[in-house]
């Protein structure tokens, strides 16, 4: 009998710390609130989170990373005399929870000593609810062999294309169970299942390092299960991206100058993220993040007035979109998920907001955007799903047919934008010339740049719902210490007139 | 915060629990108790404390390996993650390049490793941080500005042990402050970070940021184009972050480095020398790598010639050279990385560089630097928080922020003056020891609205 077949006597050893039964977690949450109040908190909320994750990476035909793990802990946030304090602990015993609650109150008291005016929170109904994200196939029920088979079969195909120098693949799966409670009486239980997948083909010669990614740069991520990996069919797209990576080595350089530009939907998703999502975060607009992530040109005086984009441009923050990466039932301060217009018919109309920023611009209620990376991070205003409402330009093929001369760019390569979110420059992995309504030759090293409001006002066509994809960005960075966040961006391809292209090489 | 003794117990527990079921087991522990105080608009906005300890185990069995993680460090938690790894490793593909775990590193250079744990830092309280922030806000008020920033303090640790008897432990205090001063149409920024309290003078940082903000007020636009630039320390550090991985063995094995087949060749100007040296007095960080090997001092570029790469055990084995102690925790697609760069300085001050410049631009900070072209090493990014026009040897005025597109390979060929090197922190990469630099022919492509 091998060791692995032995009865698991060691699994029955008494635990030194925490047994994660739901009843015990509930009692810990209530104990945290009680301890915070006894320590003098005027308000407290607690998030108790258990996160199970599995990250698989392959490089050529080897497993270059296989990390599985569990992270479990509690984050306690309190208000005292108008100042915030936050303390997190992974030691889930009543004694340690009590210590963390007291520490959070001490930190809040120190904050209160350095406040111009005390924090006040916008009202929100009290909830008692259970919410779970939709998924068909639990990714943790799929065997490792089946998961590796997807990546290895893709890698074999990529490496079979002459000229390819490296194949990489990644799968990511996270199950997060989150219990939230506040001294207002709200008590929530949410379960999230998130999945991600990606393959990459690299080709190198003396002059070029080219990469093609699928489904998009860093991969696609959804609030979904194993069915999303099946749906994106990585092996079925491996040959194409490998051939494109090799073809890019000898493709002509993307021209520099002014051009009509069609952005594929994944690139447009990132454009939305950087030039609409971030500037509409109210904490940025109020200067609270200016030391690192930056501020915003969308200051409150521009609300309901600024012509952010063309009249066909409608952008929403929709935390209710099924399956989209930035969806939830309730945010991390107990505010119910909402759909909020940021830009309506081209006019700047709304912000991503929180309970402690809403009243600063006269809002009666938070927009429900407070999110934290984990139990050990304090929630801050984050994007949910910031999406471009589909238009009436038909499919991508229809849009290309409707374009005399232009460039189609797809799949992000790099992104950069100033700290006020005006001037941006993006480069993509691949582009094609459009001539007389037809897709023509391939271009290497494409890039474009512009100023946010000029760019969105130049939008004259948005494809319809048939080409709409809810893209997921898993790594949005913000805050100090920096925390990442799952955000979503629904988009169909769209056309922009007279855009500066090829700036990086001009 | 786990002590060395506590870490050793966990390593012993894990290795004992694994027993002879596997060919080897490696135990990696990381933790922090750094507390962070944030402020903006002249008041505190957040105050965070989180003590986190994490455990990763890697097991090797019959040419296979797997790494599993947990933050449950109880006896049951440690045993559970070891059991999970023992079961899961059977499912892995065989790795033809997998090396057995290394034994104790007898060639340790740690005798020269400076103490980076300071009691004074551990005694900084929440009230101390709030008081320091009040003083920084006072500087803002004196200058009719608004202050925002962060002040953090605490301790980080890392421990690594394996079934070959290797055990290494490192703890290091951490103090960090960055501050942005905001005027009506200008901003200024300053930052410092290090293991020692004296390395971070919060009041001096506030005054420097305030000076930047007031002296760059009423900025005017300049025409984009090629300029001589003076990169202050932080600007130079953050500009170069995308270059470092190109100095690794793995980036060459993967054919992704911009310096392929250039070993021994002149790649930068004569005045550029780059070392990796964790033992440098102004460096910080752990003296062992992701497999527990002692980090060696490596001269990467000497007077412009690419002399050496850095290697972990895997890339070194594949390339037939000795490892330099720069491996990342296995398994890892990136493989290795230089973590403690020292770009050798030459004594010139920023003031000297300004005085010798007929027309140029002085940069305090660069932002959102991203790689556009990995072959030509073109990066783009923006200036922020203090951008100045230099004319006739003097700073003449603040200017609106600019977008640049520059080749890092060209930047290091076009160094006009090398400044004094010092420990420097930015926001695009980890702190390193770098000089300020004066660079010719720096390409600004667009100007923004502020």
Image (cartoon, coloured by chain):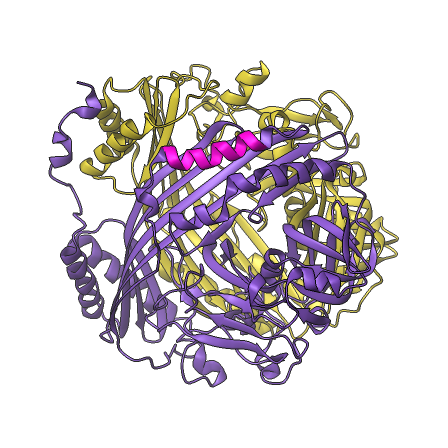
**Left or right position of A109 against B381:** left
Q: Chain B is drawn in which colour?
A: yellow
Q: Colour of chain A?
A: purple
Residue at x 58% of width, y 27% of height: B250
Q: In this view, does B7 lie above or below B31?
A: above
Q: Is residue B299 above or below residue A198?
A: above
Residue at x 53% of width, y 32% of height: A155
Q: In the picture, residue A199 is in which quadrant?
A: top right
Residue at x 15% of width, y 25% of height: A6
Across and down, in percent, residue A408 comes to 72, 56
* A154 within the magenta span: yes
Image quarter (top left, top right, bottom left or bottom right) of the N terminus of chain A:
top left
Across and down, in percent, residue A119 comes to 39, 77
Count of marks, rendered view? 0
Bounds of the magenta segment: A145-157
* B315 within the magenta span: no
Q: Is the magenta stretch mostly helix, strand or loop?
A: helix
Front residue (pair B132, A58): A58
Is residue A453 in view from this perspective?
A: yes
Across and down, in percent, residue B407 comes to 76, 42
Front residue (pair B318, B55): B318
Front residue (pair B379, A341): A341
Across and down, in percent, residue B331 comes to 44, 30
């Amino acid at each position: 009998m091998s060791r692995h077949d032995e009865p698991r006597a060691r699994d029955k050893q008494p635990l030194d710390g925490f047994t994660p039964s739901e009843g015990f977690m509930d009692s810990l949450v209530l104990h945290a609130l009680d301890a915070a109040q006894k320590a003098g908190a005027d308000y407290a909320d607690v998030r108790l989170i258990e996160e199970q994750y599995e990250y698989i990476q392959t490089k050529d035909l080897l497993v270059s990373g296989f990390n599985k793990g569990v992270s479990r802990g509690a984050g306690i946030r309190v208000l005292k005399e108008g100042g915030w304090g936050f303390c997190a602990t992974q030691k889930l015993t009543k004694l340690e929870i009590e210590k963390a609650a007291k520490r959070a109150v001490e930190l809040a008291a120190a904050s209160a000593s350095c406040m111009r005016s005390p924090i006040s929170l916008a009202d929100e109904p009290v909830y008692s609810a259970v919410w779970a994200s939709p998924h068909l196939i639990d990714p943790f029920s799929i065997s490792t062999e089946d998961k590796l088979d997807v990546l290895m079969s893709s890698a074999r195909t990529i490496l079979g294309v002459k000229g390819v120098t490296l194949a990489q693949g990644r799968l990511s799966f996270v199950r997060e169970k989150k219990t939230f409670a506040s001294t207002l009486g709200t008590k929530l239980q949410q379960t999230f299942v998130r999945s991600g997948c990606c393959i990459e083909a690299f080709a190198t010669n003396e002059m070029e390092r080219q990469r093609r990614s699928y489904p998009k740069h860093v991969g696609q991520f959804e609030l979904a299960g194993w069915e999303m990996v099946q749906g994106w069919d990585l092996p079925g797209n491996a040959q194409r991206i490998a051939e494109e990576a090799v073809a890019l080595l000898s493709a002509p350089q993307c021209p520099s100058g002014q051009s009509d530009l069609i952005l594929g939907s994944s690139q447009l998703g990132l454009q939305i993220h950087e030039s609409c999502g971030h500037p509409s975060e109210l904490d940025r607009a109020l200067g609270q993040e200016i030391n690192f992530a930056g501020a915003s040109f969308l200051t409150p005086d521009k609300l309901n007035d600024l012509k952010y984009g063309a009249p066909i441009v409608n952008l929403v923050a929709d935390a209710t979109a099924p399956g989209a990466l930035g969806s939830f039932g309730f945010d991390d301060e107990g505010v119910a998920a909402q759909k909020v217009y940021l830009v309506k018919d081209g006019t700047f109309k709304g912000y991503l907001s929180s309970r402690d920023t809403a009243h600063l611009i006269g809002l009666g209620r938070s927009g429900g955007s407070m999110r934290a990376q984990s139990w050990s991070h304090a929630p801050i205003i984050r994007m949910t799903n910031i999406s471009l409402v589909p238009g009436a330009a038909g499919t991508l093929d229809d849009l290309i047919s409707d374009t005399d001369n232009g460039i189609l760019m797809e799949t992000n390569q790099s992104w950069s934008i100033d700290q006020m979110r005006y001037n941006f420059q993006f480069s993509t992995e691949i582009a094609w010339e459009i001539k007389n309504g037809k897709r023509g030759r391939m271009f290497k090293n494409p890039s474009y740049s512009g100023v946010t409001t000029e760019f969105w006002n130049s939008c004259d066509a948005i494809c319809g719902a048939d080409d709409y994809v809810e893209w997921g960005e898993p790594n949005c960075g913000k805050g100090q210490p920096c925390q990442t966040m799952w955000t979503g961006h629904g988009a169909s391809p769209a056309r922009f007139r007279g855009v500066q292209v090829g700036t990086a090489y001009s | 915060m786990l002590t060395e003794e506590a870490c050793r117990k966990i390593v012993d527990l894990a290795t004992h629990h694994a027993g002879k079921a596997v060919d080897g087991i490696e135990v990696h522990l990381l933790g922090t108790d750094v507390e962070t105080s944030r402020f903006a608009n002249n008041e505190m906005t957040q105050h965070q404390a989180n003590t986190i300890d994490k455990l990763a185990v890697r097991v090797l069995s019959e040419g296979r390996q797997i790494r599993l993680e947990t933050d449950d460090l109880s006896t049951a938690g440690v045993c559970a993650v070891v059991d999970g790894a023992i079961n899961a490793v059977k499912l892995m593909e065989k790795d033809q390049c997998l090396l057995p775990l290394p034994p104790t590193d007898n060639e340790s250079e740690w005798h020269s490793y400076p103490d980076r744990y300071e009691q004074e830092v551990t005694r900084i309280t929440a009230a101390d941080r709030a008081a320091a922030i009040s003083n920084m806000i006072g500087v803002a008020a004196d200058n009719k500005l608004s202050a925002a920033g962060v002040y953090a303090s605490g301790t980080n640790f890392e421990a690594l042990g394996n079934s070959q008897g290797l055990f290494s432990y490192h703890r290091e205090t951490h103090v960090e402050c960055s501050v942005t001063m905001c005027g009506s149409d200008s901003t200024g920024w300053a930052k410092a970070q290090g293991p020692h309290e004296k390395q971070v003078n919060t009041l001096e940082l506030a005054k420097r940021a305030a000076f930047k903000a007031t002296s760059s007020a009423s900025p005017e636009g300049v025409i984009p184009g090629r300029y001589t630039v003076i990169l202050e320390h932080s600007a130079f550090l953050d500009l170069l972050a995308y270059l470092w991985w190109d100095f690794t063995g793995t980036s060459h094995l993967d054919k992704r480095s911009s310096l392929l087949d250039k070993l021994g060749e002149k790649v930068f100007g004569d005045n550029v020398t780059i070392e990796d040296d964790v033992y440098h007095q102004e460096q910080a960080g752990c003296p062992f790598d992701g497999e527990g090997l002692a980090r060696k001092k490596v001269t990467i570029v000497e007077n412009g010639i690419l002399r050496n790469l850095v290697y972990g055990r895997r890339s070194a084995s594949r390339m037939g050279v000795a490892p330099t102690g720069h491996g990342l925790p296995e398994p890892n697609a990136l493989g290795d990385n230089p973590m403690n760069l020292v770009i050798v300085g030459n004594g010139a001050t920023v003031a000297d560089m300004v005085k010798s410049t007929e027309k140029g631009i002085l940069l305090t900070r660069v932002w959102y630097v991203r790689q556009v072209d990995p072959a030509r090493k073109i990066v783009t990014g923006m200036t922020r928080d203090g951008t100045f026009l230099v004319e006739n040897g003097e700073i003449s005025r603040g200017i609106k922020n600019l977008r640049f597109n520059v080749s890092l390979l060209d930047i290091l060929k076009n160094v006009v003056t090398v400044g004094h090197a010092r420990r420097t922190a930015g926001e695009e990469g980890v702190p390193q020891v770098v000089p300020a630099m004066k660079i010719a022919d720096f390409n600004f492509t667009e100007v923004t609205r502020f």
